[in-house]
Image (cartoon, rainbow, N blue to C red):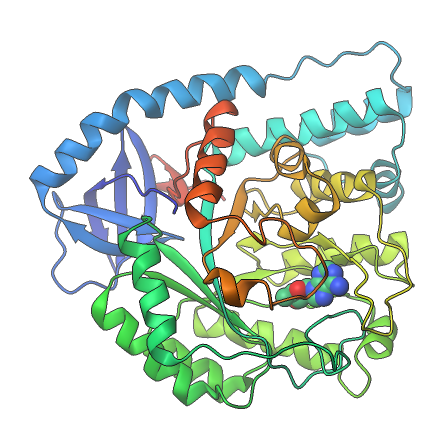
Amino acid sequence: MCYAIPGLVEEIENNLAIIDYFGEKRKAYNELEHLSPGDFVYAQGGFVIKKIPPEEAQSILSTWKETFFELQEVDLRLSRLQLERKAISNDLLRILDKVLEEKTLSQKEALFLLNLEDEKERELLYKTANFLRRKYLGNSCCVHGIIEFSNFCSRNCSYCGISIHNRKLKRYRMSDEEIIQTAIQAIDQYGFQALVLQSGEDPCFPAKRLAELIKELKRQRPVLIFVSCGEVGERGLEILYQAGARGILMRFETSNPVLYEKLHPGYSLEERIQHLKIAYQIGYLIITGALIGLPGQSDEDLLNDIFLTSELRAEMCSFGPFLPHPETPLGHSRPPNKTRVLNALALIRILAPKHSKILVTTAFETLDPLARENGLMAGANSLMLNVTPAHFRKQYVIYPHRAHEKESLEDQIKQTLQLLYKLGRAPTDLGTEITNGENKA
Ligand code: 5AD
């Protein structure tokens, strides 16, 4: 839903619009033909999505104004950082001081944070990450919708429940019409501004077909589209971008090439990374990351995963726990514990570029019922809600017993808003901050 707040265009220079939100300045790339200073717009993920009539904008702004400042106040209160130094080791205090001074951590220091176990110490780590989240990104929380339109997949990822390993899974494909209708309902009825179109690598959905679908959807509604259909190749990426897709969600899964090839026999990490690099060059917003707790993953691997995510210039980091699926070769392996995942999220906030968003994944929510709240209080600031029709959703079993599998979208939204308001987060995406016309990043 990301309830976009209307913004007032102040300036446009070379397709870059400076937009004002209650005094805060943000920048967004503009692709609309007739846009001038003084216009009101919705922006999303750093792109201007649509122009809105001034009367409509004013009326929405007047209802938002109070809530906007109220939420900011709650967030400010909850993310204040009093460094409680009692019962905290000097090593940790020294490292966190370094973090707050924005100094680069050594590998040893980063690993120290990743492996923190003491509850009090971990609390301080999460608080520090949350403090940085607010400092760099304010209280906005991106809430994208995801449509899982096909669970056919030709790949052999040894952890994934929709891979070719799973012969018991009932496969489905939504029709083009169903996909477009689902998207339009998510936009019109529930207010989503950004949608992820996800599937396995399904030969029945080549880039050309997807491109037609995206064109049709964009013709009908202004929306930010992320594609998440695996490796479509350079040409595929170009076709999809031309059709109107502006983001890609694709994890590299692990930055360790040996582990990558073990988990994906016959495929190479290098190719996957190259794919993400090309996507960035074409202009896509990148959402990427890795699995936490993959069998065979070392602490150093996970740290390198975080560095690779930054190197790939992810605008959003997507890291979730590995959860065993019985119909896969890794079905008997153990998932990581909650602490590992929370420590990793906090460390991502500390190590990743300031303006990266961090997702709380459904896999983490499946691992622990409090994951969403805990993750948002440990550096994360993004969520994805599943807008796939319920009868298909339950067949998209990348791992068993997915959180929210059976909840209606209305309930998912209600719960999300309740939590966000409790934490003082606005379900909006205001984009990148500007100070005195300069990008802070
Ligand atoms: N546990 C957790 N996440 C998984 N994914 C696939 N299988 C699993 C699993 N068993 C994730 C992969 C993929 C995304 C769509 O789902 O990281 O990129």
Q: Is residue 355 visible?
A: no
Which residue is outermost to the top?
86
Q: Nearer the viewer, residue 111 or 292?
A: 292
Q: Is residue 406 visible?
A: yes
Q: Nearer the viewer, residue 384 or 62?
A: 384
* Displayed-image quarter of ligand 1: bottom right
Q: Is residue 136 left or right of residue 106?
A: left
Q: Residue at x 58, y 49 (%)?
A: 404
Residue 94 coordinates in the image, percent (x, y): 83, 24
Q: Nearer the viewer, residue 308 or 160?
A: 160
Residue 185, picture quadrant = bottom left
Residue 140, picture quadrant = top left
Q: Residue at x 35, y 20 (%)?
A: 69
Total labels drawn: 0
Residue 112, picture quadrant = top right
Residue 50 coordinates in the image, percent (x, y): 22, 55
Q: Is residue 426 left or right of residue 43?
A: right
Q: Is residue 241 left or right of residue 43?
A: right
Q: Nearer the viewer, residue 68 or 313?
A: 68
Q: Residue at x 79, y 40 (%)?
A: 338
Above or below 386: residue 113:
above
Residue 210 coordinates in the image, percent (x, y): 41, 81
Residue 58 coordinates in the image, percent (x, y): 13, 33
